[in-house]
Amino acid sequence: HVLRNPSLVGSGPQCSCLPVPPTLSSMDRVPMGSLQHCCGQLPKMGDTWAQLPWPGPPHPTMLLVSLLLAAGVMHSDAGTSCPVLCTCRNQVVDCSGQRLFSVPPDLPMDTRNLSLAHNRIAAVPPGYLTCYVELRALNLRNNSLMELPAGLFLHAKRLAHLDLSYNNLSHVPADMFQQAHGLVHIDLSHNPWLRRVHPQAFQGLVQLRDLDLSYGGLAFLSLEALEGLPGLVTLQIGGNPWVCGCTMEPLLKWLRNRIQRCTADSQLAECRGPPEVEGAPLFSLTEESFKACHLTLTLDDYLFIAFVGFVVSIASVATNFLLGITANCCHRWSKASEEEEI
């Protein structure tokens, strides 16, 4: 910026990023990183250097300017540096298999593919993905994650592939994928403690095509969680301890209607309860299997129940009357026997 002073460099292009000091004698007031914000090009070396009002030969001047330029370049490169233990190439950052206990900070701003797989990461800090708006794929496979912070994907609007398999997630809350409307593939498989998926967990993910919920701890899955996924093509739900009671019927009905255009691992999905259907393939259950869930009583049934109740009541009264008479007779007979003996 000092070199762009119009009084020193004639009619060259100007930069308005910072105030231009009147003379080079005030150089000590220019911030070290200021040069990186300049929006034009530095003047060419030549006769211009002779016009600078610095005493002495130009060599110290050139050295000082070079140092300032180097400091600015180093500062500007900080946002694109590759984290330690990671490799960065073509917008792909690979930090997998490095035994990391926390996520690496300061990723390149243009990161599109981030792999943190096969580490020991237990938590992701809130807002970690805020700056990486170009992110397309995030791999957190095989870590120790128990939950994700709310709103983690608020700014990751271009995220399409998310792998959270082989972790310790216990539930999928309603706000886990908030604003991540570009998701196409979600892998939540092999989370053995995954017990609950919120009915609105996948709300708004209209582009989602592949969803893997296999090998978790799910005993029930709300139909509402899947109804809002019009583009779903592949659904994996095998390896879970499904309880095939009356609450499972709506989900099975929905899956049967979509089985032609929705690939499901029907052979791996089995019932773990109730006992009468334990071990049965989930998709082998028919409407007949849930007949007891739709048991309804007719008018004749209600009249019969009322009649039986009336008869039982009369019988109970009669029985009590007879028992009372019998007890009274026994008491009188016993008293008469005692008087005779006396």
Image (cartoon, helix red, strand yellow):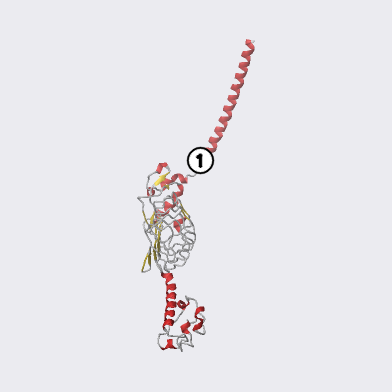
- Dot 1, crowdedness within 10 Å: few (<14), some or many (≥20)? few
- The residue located at (41%, 45%) in the rendering is 272
Q: Position of residue 200 (x, y in %)?
A: 48, 57
Q: Quadrant of residue 160?
A: bottom left
Frontmost residue, 247 versus 310:
247
Relative to 164, is 2 above or below?
below
Relative to 177, is 81 above or below?
below
* Residue 20 in sight from this viewpoint: no
Q: Which residue is mark 1?
A: 301
Q: Amino acid at mark 1?
A: Asp
Relative to 190, is 153 above or below?
below
- The residue located at (46%, 49%) in the rendering is 247
Q: Position of residue 250 (x, y in %)?
A: 45, 52
Frontmost residue, 226 versus 331:
226
Q: Position of residue 188 (x, y in %)?
A: 41, 56
* Residue 330 in sight from this viewpoint: yes
**Outermost front residue:** 56
The number of discs equals 1
Is 340 displayed left or right of 34 in the figure?
right
- The residue located at (41%, 70%) in the rendering is 80
Frontmost residue, 64 versus 10:
64
Q: Position of residue 240 (x, y in %)?
A: 40, 49
In the rendered view of the protein, which quadrant contains the C terminus? top right
Callout 1: SS: helix
